[in-house]
Image: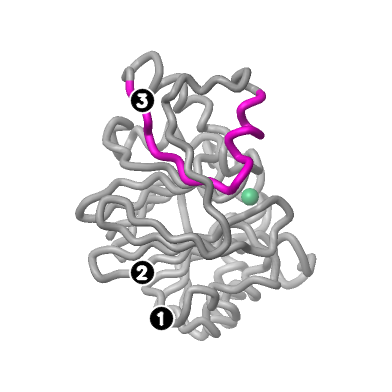
Amino acid sequence: MELTVLGCSGSYGAPAGGACSGYLVRTAGATLWLDCGNGTLANLQRHAAVDDVTAVIVTHWHPDHCVDLYGLHILLKYALGRQGLPVYAPEGTEARLGTLVDDDWGGVFAWNAVGDGATTTIAGCSLRFSRTDHPPPTMAVEIAADGKRLVYTADTGPAWSPEAFGPGADLVLSEATFQRHNELGRVHISARQAGEAARAAGARRLMLTHLWPGLDPTASVVEGSEAFGREVLLAAPHQRTRI
Ligand SMILES: [Zn+2]
């Protein structure tokens, strides 16, 4: 399993091409696009052919996680002539986003609503979803394939933890929007909280992502590593990681 970061800027785009949340997960049988925040469609095309994408997973309908679905819709409809690309998203996402396309996606997406505890299999990958602590319906996802387990926290406050998927994930890709000094206590977590939660969940490795633009990422790594008990990884655009 390989993870490619398409974008990792928290909540809004960062300077110098820092796209919002998006990841490409490649397994022996699948190419999964996990969140399609602003800027990620452009970056994806440096790493994969759009026609090779097996399915899209949208964790929630906040714009920094989903707006490049619009560009994808146009590309599939007019450039590739493709229909029925599976999209997995929380209940209500199709209708919410549909207002900007006059509720007509032209059949390019096959929408699948996922809720807390949902499971599915996509091209040899086993997926599980868990509702996080974030205002709109938001689904963390575990992708298990090729003998490895990746857990992506999506966006979450401290009342949810990757422990929801059981212990021992090979990599937890965790939001770490804030730092100790500006923890909100809800909606998002800090690098410290990401480290503590991943440690409690027995994660083998932890990668921090979705850092608030302007915060010093080095400080987030130090804080997250202290809490995790080992050096954490830091997501960066176009970075590829073997899981
Ligand atoms: Zn976000």
Quadrant housing residue 110: top left
Question: Which of the two residues, 143 or 68, is positioned nearer the viewer here?
Answer: 143
Alpha-carbon span between mark 2 and mark 1: 8 Å
Which residue type carries mark 2? Arg
Q: Are marks 1 and 3 in contact (CB under 8 Å)?
A: no
Q: Which residues are magenta?
A: 82-99
Q: Is residue 108 visible?
A: yes
Q: Is residue 234 visible?
A: no
Which residue type carries mark 1? Gly
Q: Residues within 10 Å of mark 3 (few under 14, many from 20)?
A: some
Query: Which residue matches tag 2?
Result: 149
Which residue type carries mark 3? Gln
Q: What colouring style does the render use? A: one colour
Query: Which residue matches tag 1?
Result: 168
Q: Residues within 10 Å of mark 2 (few under 14, many from 20)?
A: many
Q: Are marks 2 and 1 in contact (CB under 8 Å)?
A: yes
The local secondary structure at tag 1 comes to loop
- Between tags 2 and 3, which lies in front? 3
Mark 2 or mark 3, earlier in chain: 3
Is 25 left or right of 173, judged from the image as shown?
left
**As drawn, 100 above or below 20:** above
Mark 2 or mark 1, earlier in chain: 2
**What residue is shown at x 41% (from left), y 81% (from top)?**
168
Q: How many marks?
A: 3
**What residue is shown at x 42% (from left), y 50% (from top)?**
5
Question: Which of the two residues, 94 or 12, is positioned nearer the viewer here?
Answer: 94
The local secondary structure at tag 2 comes to strand
Mark 1 or mark 3, earlier in chain: 3
Query: Which residue matches tag 3?
Result: 83
The image position of residue 33, as x and y in percent, is 40, 44
